[in-house]
Amino acid sequence: MSSKSVLTSLRRYDAFPKTLEDFRIRTFGGATITIVSAAIMLLLFISEMNYYLSIEVTSELFVDTSRGEKIKIYMNVTFPKMACAILSVDTMDVAGMQQLDIKQNLMKRRLDENGKPTGDVILQKIANSTVDSKAIQSNKTKCGSCYGAETAEIKCCNSCEDVREAYRKKGWALTSPEGIEQCQEEGWAQMLKEQEKEGCNVFGYLEVNKVAGNFHFAPGKSFQQHRVHVHDLQSFGGRKFNTSHIIHKLSFGEEFPGIINPLDGHRISSDQDSGMYQYFIKVVPTVYKKLKGEEVKSNQYSVTKHSKHIRLNMGEQGLPGVFISYELSPMIIQYAERTKSFPHFLTGVCAIIGGVFTVASLIDAMVYHSAKMLKIELGKAS
């Protein structure tokens, strides 16, 4: 078989037969459809390119098997009508771990009546610290009385705060600070009076066990009395407390792309005193994996709210303040960033070109034959 006959045989399998140039008719309608098709192809190509270059985030659900971990709770909360001197932060969990009057990793900023910062940030002492550094510098040889609250750990109280701390650890209420020499010297009562109309901004983070628990912001020193958590309000002489607050930020762990914290920017403003505001939070552990392999271990949460006003003079149970209870989900969500494959992008581009070209060809043929038939009918009518 000659090469010429082989080529002739191969031509039978040509899926793209050509027409002679002389038999091609170019029309205005065909040109319009071609331009519109090209524009559509270009727009769809740009859309496909953007989709290919974007990062896709996939999610999976697993059982959380981690144990013995800690959670950092980041916060920034403002109390416009409660002074820093009377505000304390406590945490406790179902495992029996308690942190009373937390001062580690938390800072307070005093605010004036208009909510503007006044003075420097109050750098808190480390929790369980019992000696005021200023008192040590000014009273190196002095050992002040703790008024019966001395222990093996606390033998000297050189400041009003030391006496209050000693009483708290004993589980006693400090009913009359005016009778304490250290409080008189420091002008504790005068300080409370000066800060009566001030507010307080608390910011920083708490580190808690990865179990269900709660933390709260409330007035007065806290202590345990007969296994009951108590706040000492007697030293404030029947003062009323307005617990209006603004939660600028509250997150359970590090931030990651797309996270939404429902309580961020939450504001409660009330003219009524002795408000008890409760937030019940369901925490879902979350792992976010970035393209470069970096993992961010964090948490998401949902929240429900409840509030009531306590009439302390009527003996109603409760404590003014903001109480946040949290539970952890047994499931963990894992997010992972992924890029699209190039073959997938190429397939999409081919589908766009082929699809638009095919549809355009059908429309062009329909328009051309319709116009041709219309001319024939008009010719017959004339």
Image (cartoon, helix red, strand yellow):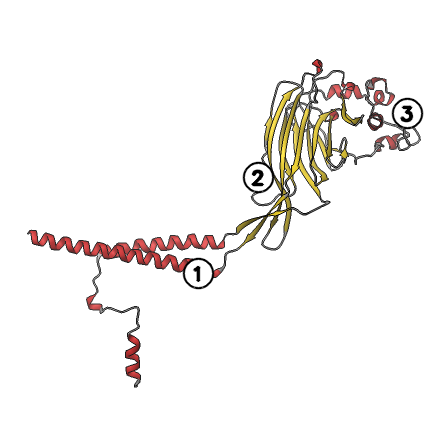
Q: Residue furthest bottom?
A: 1
In the rendered image, the quadrant that contains the N terminus is: bottom left
Query: What residue would you read off at disc 3?
Result: 145
- Sequence order check, earlier mark of 3 and 2: 3
Give the image location of residue 244, x and y in percent.
64, 24
Give the image location of residue 223, x and y in percent.
79, 27
Query: What residue would you read off at disc 2?
Result: 260
What kind of residue is marked 1? Leu
**3 or 2: mark nearer the eye:** 2
Residue at x 67%, y 38% (from the top left corner): 74
What kind of residue is marked 2? Ile
Q: In terms of depth relative to the viewer, which is nearer, 122 or 214? A: 214
Query: What residue would you read off at disc 1?
Result: 346
The number of numbered badges drawn on the structure is: 3
Residue 330, label in figure: none
Contact, mark 2 vs mark 1 (Cβ under 8 Å): no
Q: Indicate the quadrant where residue 16 lies.
A: bottom left
Q: Secondary structure at mark 3?
A: loop
Q: In terms of depth relative to the viewer, which is nearer, 263 or 93? A: 93
Q: In terms of depth relative to the viewer, which is nearer, 157 or 7? A: 7
Q: Indicate the quadrant where residue 46 lies.
A: bottom left
Q: Secondary structure at mark 1?
A: helix
Give the image location of residue 366, x and y in percent.
23, 55
Question: Is the residue marked by circle 2 packed among few (<14), some (14-19), or many (20+) residues within 10 Å?
Answer: few
What kind of residue is marked 3? Ser
Give the image location of residue 349, x and y in percent.
41, 58
